Image (spheres, helix red, strand yellow):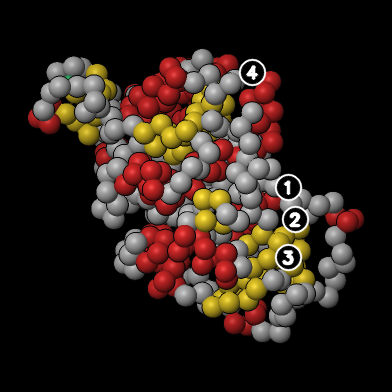
Amino acid sequence: MIKPHGGRLINRYVKTGSVAPLRGLPRVRLSEVALSDLYNIADGTFSPLTGFMRGPELGDVINRNKVNGVPWTIPVVLDADKAAVNGLKKGKSIALEGDDGKVVARMELEDIYTHKKDEYALKVFGTRDRRHPGVNLAYEMKEYLLGGKVHVFRKQDNVKNYLSPLEVRKIITDKGYKSVAGFQTRNVLHRAHEYLQRCALEHVDGLFLQPIIGWKKKGDFTADAIIKAYREFISDYYPGNRVVFGTLKTAMRYAGPKEAVFHAIIRKNFGCTHFIVGRDHAGVGGYYGKYEAHDIFDKIGDVGINILKFKEPLYCKKCDLVVTEKTCGHGPEYHQEISGTLVRKIIKNGHQPKHKIFRPEVYKILLKEFKRKHLFY
Ligand SMILES: [Zn+2]
């Protein structure tokens, strides 16, 4: 079994009885994004992180792509406004509460620092353009950041199809997989995804399909639509003993190559030996090059998971197959693009995507379960 990032799987859950009394501690309310990341720290999804990043750690991440000496590319931070920060002291504990006002964790407050949003945006996303959804989200954060270890004593509830890293690792052991490829998505699956997944399955013992269901930009598919479509597709088409399905609740950052590294590290923590990276992974608009998310793995040092780099799958009219530039000799005039953006656009406009790029069965599932407008955020 592959080791988690940094060597061991972090567990920051504690029993209620074992936390120091929380009464009287100053309270900080978590945003939706921070709350889901608190749980990702707690269950080891973000190993080796044990808390929200302190100033020097954030500096290491955005300037050197490292945390605790291992590769790491995406900040995991807790933001707070001036009123919340007033009266807080470094070295003391604070209580973290969810949006229902219930305390979920204690944090050892090790650092309070200013959120330098321009630098953050430029170094993480490569742009300060607020039309970029990840950049906009960063600018909407509050003006201070709090760092320190967390002790979490309430489990996350109501996350559909959630499996923890420990649970997925147990499934991998029980099924006897020697190799597992992780697949990241924020879309309902189309034929290009299917092509990549089947190619990977030819190569490895198991496939771990894990869509992101946290915060996403307006216009993306809803979590329910993705889950429903995947579950039905898997049971109707894939060999059940070779596919594991679970969801990952964290925000999409749309940080392209840096987020590809982040996504790979997360799947390593779930026990994957391989990770699939296609065209413009976690990209948005035209901010990143088509294969920048491939190239970053050559620059960043060993992440400790095998990266399966795939060229863009296209439908070729002449081959009458889904192909890539590596497997088909025909020119662009024969090629039809297959992308989540295209599929969403066709469905939003009230049409059914052609079966060569999108399975009619998946389209039927979506329309049976959801009104068209409820398919998207
Ligand atoms: Zn062809």
Residue 319 picture location, percent across and down:
18, 17
Quadrant field for ligand 1: top left
Earlier residue among tags 1 and 2: 1
Q: Earlier in the sequence, mark 3 or mark 4?
A: 3
- Circle 2 crowding by C-alpha within 10 Å: few under 14, some 14–19, many from 20: many
Left or right position of 241 against 366? right
Q: Nearer the viewer, residue 260 or 68?
A: 68
The answer for how far apart the CA atoms under marks 3 and 1 are is 14 Å
Find numbered disc 3 in the image and state the secondary structure of the residue it sits on: strand
What distance separates the C-alpha of mark 2 from that of mark 4?
Answer: 32 Å
Q: Earlier in the sequence, mark 2 or mark 3?
A: 3
The label number, if any, that marks residue 176 in the structure image:
4
Q: Disc 3 designates what residue?
A: 107
**Viewer-side label of 1, 2:** 1
Residue 189 vs 58, above or below: the answer is above
Q: Secondary structure at mark 2?
A: strand
Is residue 374 among the parts visible in the rendering?
no
| Amino acid at the residue labelled 4 | Gly
The residue indicated by pointer 2 is 152
Q: Amino acid at mark 2?
A: Val
> Tag 3: residue type?
Met
C-beta proximity under 8 Å, tags 2 and 3: no
Q: Quadrant of residue 245?
A: top right
